[in-house]
Image (cartoon, helix red, strand yellow):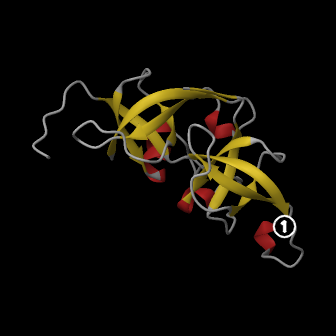
Amino acid sequence: MVLGRVIGNVVSTIKHDCYKNKKLALVKPISPDNKLKSGVQVAVDLVGAGKGDTVILSSEGRAAEELCGFSSRMPLRTLIVGIVDSLESDVK
Amino acid sequence: MKLGRVVGKVWATAKDDQLNSVRLALMQPVDEHEKPAGKIVVAADTINCRDGDIVYWVGGSEATSPYHDRRIPSDVTIIGLVDKLNT
């Protein structure tokens, strides 16, 4: 899992069935010293994160399958699985 | 999942049986400002998107399972159309 910052959300009507009734967030990976890294991910938000929140991002299909309650493989891999309250880091 | 812009179509007659009736699109991965981010790829298109559409796609092994009855030999599969990006 990696740390990320929610920078917005995605509105989408035409999509795969497994995305029905799921919130989609735009998440940018961050380093432990709070700097935004390159790249942006579209993530299914299971925890109700808002814009500006620091979150934990999981990018694994089997984890997504488990947490969303799917009975077979689905084309979904990136999930927000937690909101970070505080972070202590010695990384310089 | 990541963002991309559809920039074209690909037709192929001789292809793996599992790809029969799967549309193929050319897609430019983009960032949150819809600016190009990376190289153009051939993607399996499950939503019937058109040129210029902003879409989201899944890569890796999850790209093989958009259909319930079979696995497709794809590593980039378009699975949703973006109506609006709120940033």
A2 up-or-down from B72: above or below: above
Instruction: Locate residue A74 relative to residue B6 in the image: left or right.
Output: left
Look at 61% across and 26% down and name the residue there: A21
* Residue at the left extreme of this rendering: A90
| Outermost bottom residue | B14
**Residue B24, can we see it?**
yes
Q: Up-down: is A54 above or below A3?
A: above
Residue A90: image quadrant is top left
Residue B68 pos. (x, y %) = 70, 52
Instruction: Tell me if residue B69 can be seen.
Output: no
Q: Is residue B31 left or right of residue B79?
A: left
Chain of the residue under the numbered disc 1 shown in the image: B
Quadrant for the C terminus of chain B, please. top right
**Depicted B71 relative to depicted A73: above or below:** below
A10 vs B23, left or right, is left
Q: Which residue type does callout 1 highlight?
A: Asn
Residue under the image location 42 percent in, 35 percent down: A80
- Percent across and percent down for residue B47 are 78, 45
Task: Please name whichever residue, A36 or A47, is drawn nearer the observer in this view of the structure.
Answer: A36
State the residue position of label 1.
B20
**Tag 1, which secondary structure?**
loop
Task: Return the x and y of residue A6 as percentages of the image width and height.
Answer: 43, 29
Q: Is residue A22 left or right of residue B9?
A: left
Q: Residues within 10 Å of mark 1 (few under 14, many from 20)?
A: few
Q: Where is residue A22, by image quadrant?
A: top right
Residue at figure coordinates x 63%, y 39% from the top left: A18
How many numbered markers are drawn? 1
- Percent coordinates x, y for residue A7 in the rendering: 46, 29
Is B86 above or below relative to A71?
A: above
